[in-house]
Image (tube, grey):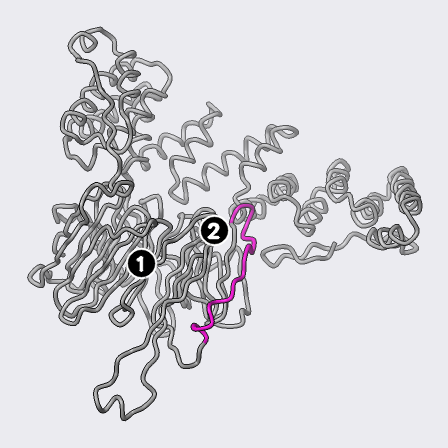
Amino acid sequence: MGAAAEGGVRAPPLRHVRGGQPRRGTAARHSTGQGAELYSALQQRYREAFRRFEREGRIDEAAFVLAELLGAVEEAVSFLERHGRFKLAAELAEGRKLAPGLVVRQWFLARDVARAVAIARRSGAFGDAVARLERSNPPEALALRLLWAETLAEAGDYARAVQVVWPVAKNRAPAREWLERGVASGGATGARLLAMWATAFADGLTVAGARVRELLDDDAPERASERFVFGLALVEEPPSANRTALVVPTLRALLRDRAAGNARFTSDQSLIKRLLGDAPDGTLHTDLPSLADNTHPAWRDTHARPRIDITVRASEAGTFTLHDVVVLPDGRLLYALGEAGARLVREDGRTVAHFDVPAFHLVPSIHGDRVLALARRDEVWRLSRLDLVARRCSPWVDMSLTDWSPSYDGNVWFVTSENMVMMVDALAADCRALWRVPELASRAFSIAADATHMSFIVGAQERWTYTLADGPTLRDRSELPPEVSDPRMVSWHQSVVPDGEAAVLCMEYPSNPEDVARGWNHLRSSLAWVQPVSLRNRVRTECDHETLKGIFLSREWFLELMDLGPDWQLQLTDRRGFSRAVLTFEGNARPRVRLTDSVLLAFDAGGRGVWLDLESGEVRHFPVP
């Protein structure tokens, strides 16, 4: 009962029963040697002791018998709760590492709300805790549900915040503000929330009407997916006057996209039929010809289209040094311009906002509403927060960092600092870790995380992978291939995917100075791989290691950076081993890369850059900063 709880908290032990009876493990060992009868007799004796202690009001000792001797930990937690020992019940549940939802429930009942929320954020157990409370404590369940929604909204996950709070009608007031902020973040999620905003409130169409018209009247191909999502959300909304008013304009916008060939990836036939059925009159039924299925496979899923070849000319350089860039859900770009700050621009290059904080690296939230900006200051990194919706920025903390996950969920951020890995509380005012792995054998780097997994590399020895459901849990430790730890080799570049796939590029320099003097300075290199823990395969490409200078992985793609002498080249391969795109950067400026399953960004310090949409195959050149 004195085991250390996750996050460095130690649960105090229950007082021992007088006389020091053997623990359950002792009884189990005796049962192995003397048979099941002795074990059963001991269990019966312990159960009788529990009942006696309960009758005598010796609650702590009775709970000790349940938890330590009978091994009935959950029963002991329930017993303590029944007798009003809420804090002790919570400490027992956390110390014995029971289900996180149960631990959160017990701390909430113990009135330690901060502790309950911290554990729920670390483990993602809000939903389970609310469900457990609803069965026994409805008022507390309602309060925790609202805290859950507020936490999601604070992290920028407005869609889920609205979803969590919506079942409780009297709690819908804050949902309106969250809907508005989610719509302002743009993208497909913003389009879905826009449909909800316009139809769920009596004045919704009046307030949100301009945004709806802007979306539906826009014929830009890149917003076709937003209009499709808007239509899907609209047909799922309950009947209302606002919903009825939007059916025909939405239907016309989808038909326009279909006629222009913009309705890609997913069949729109079922959606159009549903909208036709909801149309207030039969005019469209009469005028509309029969519709054939109009599905176009995504570029990433078909090899019928030719490989994409792009050349970025030396003449395309801008006037600012570009250190980093991210693309937002609505198509806007955020440039990191070093000490000159960060600049938010539209696709046509017009500036939307400037953020006056130093920005050399950017860490975007997956929800698209905020970004962390990093700048080196001697031995630490200065971190600033950028609110892209309110267009505000503020300094956050100075932190010693070795590496960091390239994106975060607005709630927590995974980073490494020398030989320690931390889950940083991204909502805290100061530098605070909700969870950590200290004292690793070597420095940790190349860390990546998503909603389900987190992985990192430890020195030249191992790759560690954690699952994140119910809190970080070590799933796998795999040794790196022997060439990585070969003292003759130097680890040149690494890339890791959240589910553990890793690639390490190693190079060997010539050991003989006479060879270098003669010009025999070719580098021998090798590419080492570690398989993911997920059930998926990767086709390993055979590349020219002499020119290979960098590797970048995602679950769906493999990107190689090649030094061709006068130019640099990026070669993109899909999961089936097919070459899909080649990007050539003229000149000797080494390009930098951001690669996800859906987007490839390649750019250099001179401001040249290309944005490749890996869903549609659409190519866009960065507007010059």
Residue at horizontal 40 percent and vertical 48 percent from the top: 410
Tell me, yes or no, if residue 398 can be seen here. no
Residue at horizontal 13 percent and vertical 70 percent from the top: 566
Q: Position of residue 521 (x, y in %)?
A: 25, 83
8 sits left or right of 346 in the view: right
Badge 2: how crowded within 10 Å, few (<14), some, or many (20+)? Answer: many
Nearest the viewer among 189 and 483 is 483
Residue at horizontal 41 percent and vertical 40 percent from the top: 153
Q: Position of residue 296 (x, y in %)?
A: 24, 32
Label 1: state its secondary structure: strand
Question: Marks 1 and 2: which is nearer the front?
Answer: 2
Name the disc covering residue 217, or none. none
Circle 2 residue: 453
Q: CA distance from mark 1 to mark 2?
A: 24 Å
Q: Which residues are magenta?
A: 468-485
Circle 1 residue: 373
Tell me, yes or no, if residue 370 can be seen here. yes
Q: Position of residue 323 (x, y in %)?
A: 23, 63
Badge 1: how crowded within 10 Å, few (<14), some, or many (20+)? Answer: many
**Residue 475: in magenta span:** yes
